[in-house]
Amino acid sequence: MDFTGKRVLVTGGSRGIGRAVAVGFAARGARVAINYHSSRAAAEETLSGLEGGPHLVVRADVTDPAAVERMVSVVVAGLGGLDIVVNNAGIWIDHPLDQVDYEQWQDAWRRVLEANLIGPANVSYCAARHMIDHGGGRIVNVSSRGAFRGEPDGPAYGASKAGLNSMSQSLARRLAPHNVFVGVVAPGWVETDMAADFLAGPHGDEIRDQSPLGRVARPEEVAQAVLFLAAEGSEYCTGAIIDVNGASYLRT
């Protein structure tokens, strides 16, 4: 896959899956904008490891509509355009219904939906409007296995990712005539900083054994699927949801 000359925005690009995606695009010739929210140091560390360039980092809270609009404008100005967006930023909050009070329940739903669904919707809007005016582009959204199998400890997370899937497919149908193609990658457990405590804890072996491979995914494996959906030649995969869960959950 060759992305020479492509301009890419990766939200939540400073670590984990986002970092692997940024590295993958840069290694194949793209110029990359790494979005971060809280840690500029982590974003700068990722930036320093990218091949080629020049690349850039841009701070924005994707739950803030005005910040999203500014971010896309900064990226377009800094990279000279925008061809590919990867909506990777997201959050998880524990809120099992029988263990939280009503205020905690409402707070979890509000925060998770804003970060995992409304944020990507706004990023997609701002990016797609630019792409429509400049001949097309690609949007790849990072979802989750939890959209299909449920998340008993984080129902808002599962619901947000199911909503992300539906939004992506709706946009795929709407935007195809404009040469804008939309795909989804749905990983299961991934070896990231966010998952490290879970994987090192008492249920780590149980989590790894969910897959017949006996392990969780590496970020680079998820990135490969993202790159495929963003590549030239994948247009007819628009609207597709690619599972990357090591056969830990199979859909028919």
Image (spheres, helix red, strand yellow):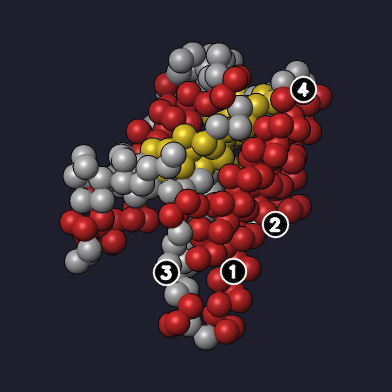
Mark 2 surroundings: few (<14), some (14-19) or many (≥20) residues within 10 A: some
Please tell me whether mark 1 sits on a helix, a strand or a loop: helix
Please tell me whether mark 4 sits on a helix, a strand or a loop: helix
Q: Amino acid at mark 3?
A: Asp
Q: Amino acid at mark 2?
A: Asp
Q: Gap in Å between the C-alphas at discs 3 and 2?
A: 26 Å
Residue at which label 2 appears? 64
Please tell me whether mark 3 sits on a helix, a strand or a loop: loop
Residue plotted at (52% across, 36% down): 241
Q: Nearer the viewer, residue 29 or 1?
A: 1
Q: How many marks?
A: 4
Residue at which label 3 appears? 153
Mark 4 surroundings: few (<14), some (14-19) or many (≥20) residues within 10 A: few
Residue plotted at (57% across, 84% down): 102
Q: Nearer the viewer, residue 132 or 64?
A: 132
Image quadrant of residue 55? Answer: top right
Where in the figure is residue 21, as x and y percent of width and height? 45, 33
Residue 203 visible to an observer of this rendering: yes
Q: Amino acid at mark 4?
A: Pro
Residue at which label 1 appears? 109
Residue at which label 4 appears? 177
